[in-house]
Image (spheres, rainbow, N blue to C red):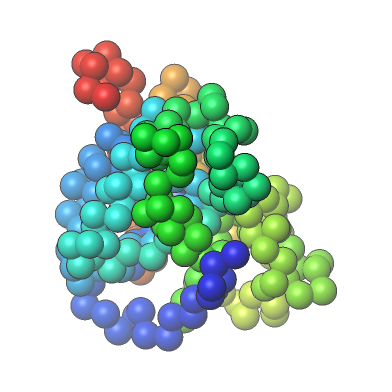
Amino acid sequence: MAKFPIKIFNNTKQIKGRRLVIPDIHGCSFTLRALIQKINLTKEDILFFLGDYIDKGIDSKGVIDEILQLQFEGYKIFTLKGNHEQTLLESIEEYPENPLIFHRAYKLEKLLNAKGEFQEKYHIFLKNLYYYFELEDYLLVHAGFDFDAEEPFKDYDAMLWMRDVFYDKKIAKFKTIIFGHQPTTLINITNSIENNSPLICLDNGAVFYDFENKGFGHLICFDLDTKKIIIQKNLEQKRLESNLI
């Protein structure tokens, strides 16, 4: 668990820049870089990531490297943990000599050193991920909150794995919950935003480039203030075809 599993922001609405959110990336580093360029990120903006940076796609290392580079360059980047990061962390800690024991299908070998050990900078990145962010008007989480739990804001498993997401306005302090984890069609995402739903899932299944005609296969950036989305279609297949790995 991160040393500080949550982070509360009290003055994000006073910043000069935008408050932006990007959901599940799943190893789509080319697509992420294209989206970052498209949104024209500035150092006055705050960019929140909702977790699931790794697995499924072809370049999990590239995704983490991009985020670390943005942080190094002084951009305001804040990162949540997804269930895929949690399972990898558990593997690293339980099987340090074989950290990818349950992730062999996900092309994570580039995260290892020459000895086959997990590289320290990536381990630190995983360990420092948060479970949720509380803003003045939003709650950001990977999967959701279990409002039936005795202490919903300490039920960390639900924050990573929950599927049947529901809303309790009093416990949520009337704040809109922004989450990912469940691939959702573009039309359903835009409808939830336009209808001012208290629950907005932003995960469009960015890794599923072959399902674009079914409304999936895009990486989304959501502006918390204008409530506009910027959409980047998956570029990883084009990358594979061009051998740009």
Q: How far across and down, in percent of the image, does residue 239 sit?
A: 26, 22
- Pick the residue in front: 120 or 36: 120
Could you tell me which quadrant the N terminus lies in?
A: bottom right
> In this rendering, is residue 35 above or below 81?
above
Q: Residue at x 40, y 46 (%)?
A: 119
Q: Residue at x 33, y 20 (%)?
A: 237
What is the count of numbered marks? 0
Which residue appears at 18% of the width and 47% of the height? 37
Q: Residue furthest top?
A: 241
x then y, percent, for residue 234: 34, 30
Give how far across and how far down residue 54 sits, in percent.
Answer: 46, 40
Residue 101 shows in this picture:
yes
User: Where residue 243 sits: x, y (%)?
Assistant: 24, 16
Of residue 119 and residue 50, the one placed in the foreground of this image is 119
Residue 71 in which image quadrant: bottom left
Would residue 192 appear left or right of 40 to someone viewing this image?
Answer: right
Please state which of residues 223 and 87 is positioned toward the viewer in this rendering: 87
* Image quarter of residue 182: top right
Q: Say above or below: 209 vs 151.
A: above
* 37 relative to 50 in the view: left or right: left
Asked whether the viewer can see residue 217, the reply is: no
| Residue drawn at 26 percent across, 24 percent down | 245
Position of residue 114 relative to residue 76, above or below, is: above
